[in-house]
Image (cartoon, grey):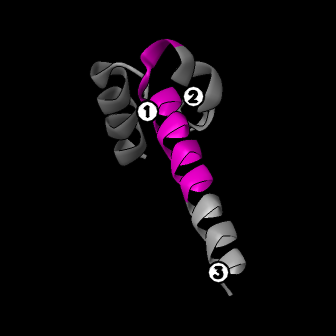
């Protein structure tokens, strides 16, 4: 039983290290632009003026 507990604890530690590394990569602006392409598809990185112009253009229809 103790060997199973050791394996589980090791897996938890490895998972925590992977979580910390992935959070660091996603919060680093230089690297995050390559990892999170969804921002470009959703228009999150556009300037605020461009987004408001698009919204007003769609409302006028």
Q: Nearer the viewer, mark 3 or mark 2?
A: 3
Residue 61's place in the image compared with 40, above or below, is below
- Magenta segment includes 27: yes
Give the camera-side residue of 32 and 43.
Answer: 32
Give the camera-side residue of 18 and 45.
Answer: 18
Marks 2 and 1, how far apart in space?
6 Å
The secondary element bearing badge 1 is classed as loop
Please give the range of residues in magenta: 13-30
Give the camera-side residue of 1 and 23.
Answer: 1
Left or right, 20 with respect to 5, comes to: left
Residue 22: x and y, percent? 55, 38
Specify few, some or many for label 2: CA neighbours under 10 Å numbering under 14, 14-19, or 20 or more: few
Residue drawn at x 31%, y 37% as measured from the top left: 56
Q: What is the magenta segment's predominant secondary structure?
A: helix
Name the residue beneath numbered marker 2. 40
The secondary element bearing badge 3 is classed as helix
Contact check, label 2 and label 1, Cβ < 8 Å: yes
Specify few, some or many for label 3: CA neighbours under 10 Å numbering under 14, 14-19, or 20 or more: few
Residue 45's place in the image compared with 1, above or below, is above
Contact check, label 3 and label 2, Cβ < 8 Å: no
Which numbered dot is residue 44?
1
Marks 3 and 2, how far apart in space?
48 Å
Sooner in the amino-acid sequence: mark 3 or mark 2: 3
Task: Report which quarter residue 17 is drawn in.
Answer: top right
Residue 24: x and y, percent? 46, 30
Which numbered dot is residue 2?
3
């Amino acid at each position: 039983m103790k060997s199973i507990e050791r394996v589980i604890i090791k897996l938890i530690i490895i998972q925590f290290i992977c979580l910390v590394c992935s959070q660091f990569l996603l919060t680093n602006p230089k690297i995050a632009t390559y990892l999170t392409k969804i921002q470009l598809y959703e228009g999150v990185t556009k300037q605020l003026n461009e987004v408001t112009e698009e919204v007003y253009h769609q409302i006028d229809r």
